[in-house]
Image (tube, coloured by chain):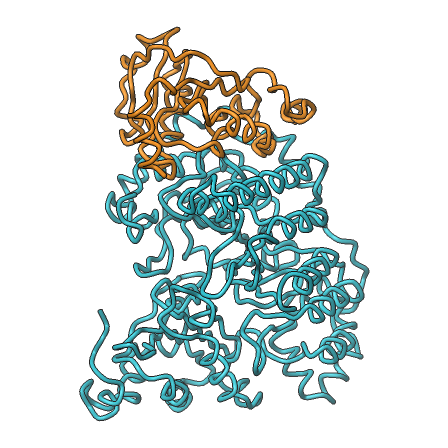
Amino acid sequence: MATAQRDRRRGAADSMTWLELATGKLVRRGEVGHIASGAVPPSALGGDDVTDLAGGALAIRFDRFSDGRGFTVARYVREVLGFTGKLVAQGHVIPDQADYLRRCGFTHVEIDRDAARQWRRSLALAPPAMQRILGSQRSRPIGPAWSDAPPERNDRDVDR
Amino acid sequence: MMYRYDEFDRAVVETRAAQFRDQVRRRLDGELSEDEFKPLRLQNGLYLQLHAYMLRIAIPYGVLSSDQLRGLAGIARDFDRGFGHFTTRQNIQFNWIKLVQAPDIIDRLATFGMHAIQTSGNCIRNVTCDPLAGAAHDEIEDPRIWAEIIRQWSTLHPEFAFLPRKFKIAVSAGVEDRAATGFHDIGLRLVTGRGGEIGFRILVGGGQGRTPRVARMLATFIPKRHILSYLEAVMRVYNAAGRRDNIYKARIKILVDDMGIERFADAVNAEWHHVRDTATDLPQAEHDRIAAYFTPPHLVDASPVPSVLATARRHDAAFARWMQQNGLPHYHPGYANAVVSLKSAGRPPGDASAAEMEAIAALADEHGQGEIRVTYQQSIIIPHIRRDALPAFYRAASAAGLGGGEHRLVGDIIACPGLDYCNLANARSLPLADRIFRRFGDPERRAAIGRLQLNISGCINACGHHHAADIGILGVDKKGVEHYQITVGGRAGEAAAIGRIIGPSFAEDEVPAVIETIIDTYLASRDRDESFAAFIARTGPDAVKEAVYGNSATGPQARRGGQHDLA
């Protein structure tokens, strides 16, 4: 599947688009200023790599969906380096990871246009965050709920 | 008493159930490849075994209500072959599951506040705990509060769902470590620090498997309020740096080996610097909200030495033996915690039928507080039983066929499912466990031998904890024939140790006699009251080696076992 997905991408680069994780909307792909690999230890990322991008976009590449290093890189970029721009997940990620990506600080995921429906569906099916027990920023929902998600779930998310 | 799901927890398990149903549908429709489905089903506890799917259900830190146990009995009846299997991680698994029914089971579980989230897969698994938590005579504070806090923090944690490998955390607060913290990826011991403050001693990198390691000390004292940020720092170091190129070298113990404990600790502290004193630490109000679920039960002023108990012990030898091993001390002198053993002839260790689960639930309702604990030794403990009710408890348990088997004697065998179920196994575990159980069928003899942990694993993955046993048995494949290698001197708990191999392996038929030889050697040479563990610690494995193989490792008895295959 990983190979198939990559092949598809190579063959039809035009079908790739960004999905906004907060809303489930598709948006036109933008420029990314720097592509970090999930394989690079977060601490090796310099502040320069990301601070120059304030207001721009940074991409983190996943070689395989089961390699979760990119999640740690994302939180590091957000919470330690203080990056505030768009954060895009690229490479082999699957719809079932949508909510995890969002909660680690990704704003967008680069996907094949055809997969958008399942990504939206997966976002809507994501359970509320158990980490509500913490006062953490990441446990709060980012942006409004997409149309087909039960809205009260996100209210509860913030409550406690 | 125990944690109860509120509306929020219910929303989590119900949404998760709907999500899983969607994933199964996509797999059946071919939208998801098996490669992509696998980690998703595993994180919902669904394994593909030798003959069928197996569903492993989380019993957070081994605590169940009687209603939940009745619910599990219903699942055994309606979806399995009438049995459930309690595991070494205080969970329960059903071995005969159909994929298409798995979403229905998950839905059913949600109706009584249970689920299978993170019982498998490369994520933080179900957190385990002292089965006597909140009822023990020797604990610093109730570790269930912390186990529950860690459960909530680790459940569907967005950063740690795709780790290099599985990750197991155990919490223990007793003077005696009853949670095997030395054999976990992270072992947490509640300890009293300088000035009387309570905090955590943190062990890291323990585990069994093909590279057994006793955990090493990572931090001698972390204040309780920082535990989540500290854990997050450890996980972050592991997620970023743990090996992903080789499944056998992907556990945190290998990373700790490679970095060395000092460098590893430095890396954790560097990460901790970023997250401590931030929102990652648990607010006191949340701690208090969770702690309120674990208020002590209402206990009456009962006698520590009721005459009915003394009389029963005098007149009923079987009860006296049971009481000696299975009546565990309670913090209230008028109460006890009773072990209901799931070890008996013909029973795979840890198996319980639906009717037996219902009988255990009734015992807990009638004599306890409606609460049940699962032990990692694959038995059940019912806490908070008045000592004057123990004879009646024993009679009721015996009537249900659950009055046999003594906690921590030679028949209290831990065994993995082995080649009867598992596609990783080299050899069967269950028939051998049964043969050994029967070999030591005389209860007087078991009592005379005293405390002895005998564990069996069907392969090097060591699910049967053979490394941590007084006598460990490991199934190996020798030219297509099942053989068994024997170790002695392993130990879980305080001063954990890895057992040492005594020599070449044996065919299944030979093993019970070899075990008997080892035990007879101990009985003949022990100092008065010396336990098997103390005997091995004193003499090393040589005495039993010689008894089993003769003077030379190539002697006649060794040849019977064939070539040396210790690698």
Left or right: where A115 falls relative to B108: left
Q: Quadrant of residue B65?
A: bottom right
Please give the letter of the chain rendered in orange: A
Left or right: where A6 falls relative to B98: left
Q: In the depicted view, which residue is nearer to us: B321 or B363?
A: B363
Q: Quadrant of residue A37?
A: top left
Give percent across and percent down for residue B432.
Answer: 44, 80
Give percent across and percent down for residue B194.
Answer: 48, 42
Q: Is residue B327 visible?
A: yes
Q: In the depicted view, which residue is nearer to us: A61 or A15?
A: A15
Q: How many marks?
A: 0
Apparent colour of chain B: cyan
Give percent across and percent down for residue B278.
Answer: 49, 24
Left or right: where B78 falls relative to B411: right
Q: In the depicted view, which residue is nearer to us: A75 or B172?
A: A75
Give percent across and percent down for residue B75.
Answer: 67, 59
Q: Is residue B141 visible?
A: no
Look at the image and tell me in which quarter the C terminus of chain B lies: bottom left
The residue shown at (39%, 6%) is: A55
